[in-house]
Amino acid sequence: MATLRDAASRVERGSGILARRIGRALTPEGRPVLAIIRIGAACLAVPPLYLAIERSPLILAPLTLGIWCRRVWQASAPVVPAAPDPEQTRRQLVQAVLEIVGARPGIHLSELYPRLLASPWSAHLDETRLRAALTDAGITIHRSMRVGDVEGRSGIKRADLEALLRPAPLSSVPDPSPADGDAGQTPPESGGERARERAETP
């Protein structure tokens, strides 16, 4: 629950935001003629509004203040960040690893971890969480592989990364229409019909 200090801080912040919005609306950038017209209209509207509030302070003053506070509160509302797309996050990680691999056939984890942890993508992770993120992204970690003159260490192959970035192939849909007869039933063999005819012939 917001305290009185938090509410006052939010009203102060919102008032500044709303004042800047009004300033930008009155003085659009690069349009001086329109700015003069809007400022002139605002100057003409202020005196009648002030006189109306002075004549009916018990009605218009609280109403004006309430409208202002409502707008201020809305302007200072915290912005909730959109949830990240898991597929996009996965592709970004794969692409980040692929950029570090470069033209080589792969990379050992002993080289990948320090470089990836130093990048903006995973600066908030440690090695344990980074390995879990690699696994969740579908990246295969080979127990023993050769990169250059070094072999026998765990690593990731570039071919696996490139395969993860390729679009998934379209699944083939079987033809629902039957090949023979209705509802896929095969017609009775003609040989059986002829044999029954011969048995009934006197």
Image (cartoon, helix red, strand yellow):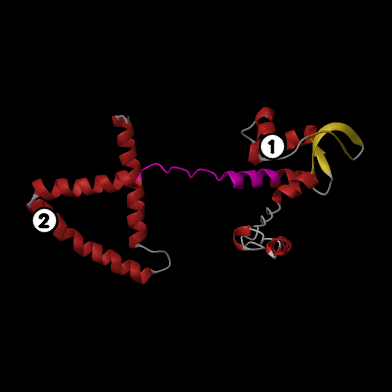
In the rendered image, residue 3 lying in the magenta stretch gets the answer no
Q: Residue furthest bottom?
A: 33
- For the C terminus, the image quarter is bottom right
Residue annotated with mark 2: 52
Q: Amino acid at mark 1?
A: Leu
In the rendered image, residue 87 lying in the magenta stretch gets the answer yes
10 Å neighbourhood of mark 1: few (<14), some, or many (≥20)? Answer: some
Q: Residue at x 78, y 34 (%)?
A: 109
Q: Residue at x 11, y 56 (%)?
A: 51
Q: Nearer the viewer, residue 134 or 29?
A: 134
Q: Nearer the viewer, residue 86 or 16?
A: 86
Residue 103: give x, y in percent of width and height: 83, 49
Secondary structure of the residue carrying tag 2 is helix
Q: Nearer the viewer, residue 194 or 131?
A: 194
Residue annotated with mark 1: 134
Residue 98: give x, y in percent of width and height: 75, 46
Chain part drawn in magenta: 76-94
Which label lies toward us, 1 or 2?
1
Q: Quadrant of residue 4?
A: top left
> In the figure, is residue 190 to the left or right of 33?
right
Q: Amino acid at mark 2?
A: Ala
Residue 143: give x, y in percent of width and height: 81, 31
Question: Which of pointers 1 and 2 lies earlier in the amino acid sequence?
Answer: 2
- For the N terminus, the image quarter is top left
Q: Residue furthest left?
A: 55
Q: Residue furthest right?
A: 149
Residue 105 in the image: above or below residue 154:
below
Residue 83: give x, y in percent of width and height: 50, 43
> In the figure, is residue 147 to the left or right of 168?
right
Secondary structure of the residue carrying tag 1 is helix
Identify the mark at residue 175; answer none if there is no mark: none
Residue 50 in the image: above or below residue 39:
above
